[in-house]
Amino acid sequence: MTKSHNTSMPRAKRWLIFIAIPGILIMLALGAWQVQRLMWKNETNAFRQARAQSEAIALPASVEDIPAMLFRPVWLEGRFQHDMEMFLAARSYRSNPGYHVITPFERSDGSVLLVNRGWIPVAKKDPATRTEGQIEGVVRIEGLLNSSVEPGWMTPENLPQEKFWYWLDMPSLSAEAGIEPRDYLIDAGPAANPGGFPIGGQTKTELRNSHVQYVVTWFALAATLGVITFLMFRGARRRAAQPTEQPNGQPNGEAKP
């Protein structure tokens, strides 16, 4: 029987039209999108870092433009309402599990807002184990203005009835504290508390940025698919250029002796 090598060229062309070209274009588009995300994250993180390192200002009585104040250092004076403290769960510090302590803070004008005082280990959840840190009287604190966050799809539901939160839901936190709803709170700065707890300065100003590896991955996949396609076409052309065999085993174009 005749064995035709030319059948590999149509197959290679179908690969090019239906797989290689669409695949390479999609991968290049995804790589370009990740480049844009990388640039945006870098700019956002640089802006947040610069803002967090600026000079602290007195916190206004009411913050209307929260995005303009987000992660800005502020200071305020007042009294902690320790009997109303609440907890953010699943928080770690140097790989140690624990909580963040959120406490209502009454200012001199009578208004109350929430302050994230910082991290405590699991063993210090009971206030009786950290009495030195339960500061009484008028104090001045400095920290960064922070706001609500959207929970991830795997984040557990908050448990307000147990004063236990897994993510910052300012409306429910304010409702549990019995104060005027605000969409922001103050993350206490790194100044040490008596007794060592809570440990302040827990604000994460930087967005998670893994886009470099995504950029490399998508462009590398596009290049790999391009190389595979090139090798496939080169092999198909070589096979197509080879003479086909006749039934008698002789190449095409050669006469029988």
Image: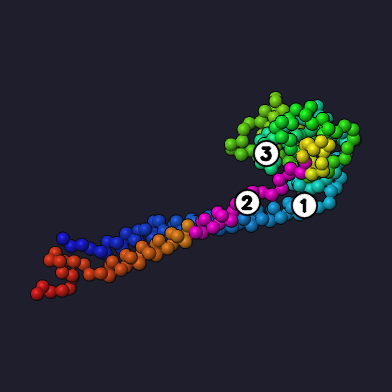
Along the polypeptide, which appears first: circle 2 or circle 3? 3
Which residue corresponds to the image point at 71% horizontal and 55% vertical from the top-left? Answer: 46
Q: According to the image, what is the colour scheme of the structure?
A: rainbow
Identify the residue position indicated by label 1 in the image. 51
Provide the secondary structure element on which disc 2 rests: loop
Residue extent of the magenta highlight: 200-220
Quarter in which the C terminus is drawn: bottom left
Identify the residue position indicated by label 2 in the image. 209
Which residue corresponds to the image point at 56% horizontal and 55% vertical from the top-left? Answer: 213
Q: Position of residue 180 (x, y in %)?
A: 80, 32
Compared to residue 17, the image places residue 79 above or below, namely above
The Cα atoms of the two marked residues, 2 and 3, are separated by: 23 Å
Q: Does the image show residue 165?
A: yes
Quarter in which the N terminus is drawn: bottom left
Instruction: Report whether 6 appears left or right of 145.
Output: left
Q: Residue type at mark 2: give it.
A: Asn
Question: Which of pointers 2 and 3 indicates the residue nearer the eye?
Answer: 3
Q: Position of residue 53 (x, y in %)?
A: 79, 52
Q: Residue type at mark 1: give it.
A: Arg
Identify the residue position indicated by label 3 in the image. 96
Along the polypeptide, which appears first: circle 1 or circle 3? 1
Question: Which of pointers 1 and 3 indicates the residue nearer the eye?
Answer: 3
Q: Quadrant of residue 33?
A: bottom right
Whether pointer 1 and pointer 3 mark residues with C-beta atoms closer than 8 Å, the reply is no
Q: Does the image show residue 145?
A: no
The Cα atoms of the two marked residues, 1 and 3, are separated by: 28 Å
User: Furthest-top residue in view?
Assistant: 161
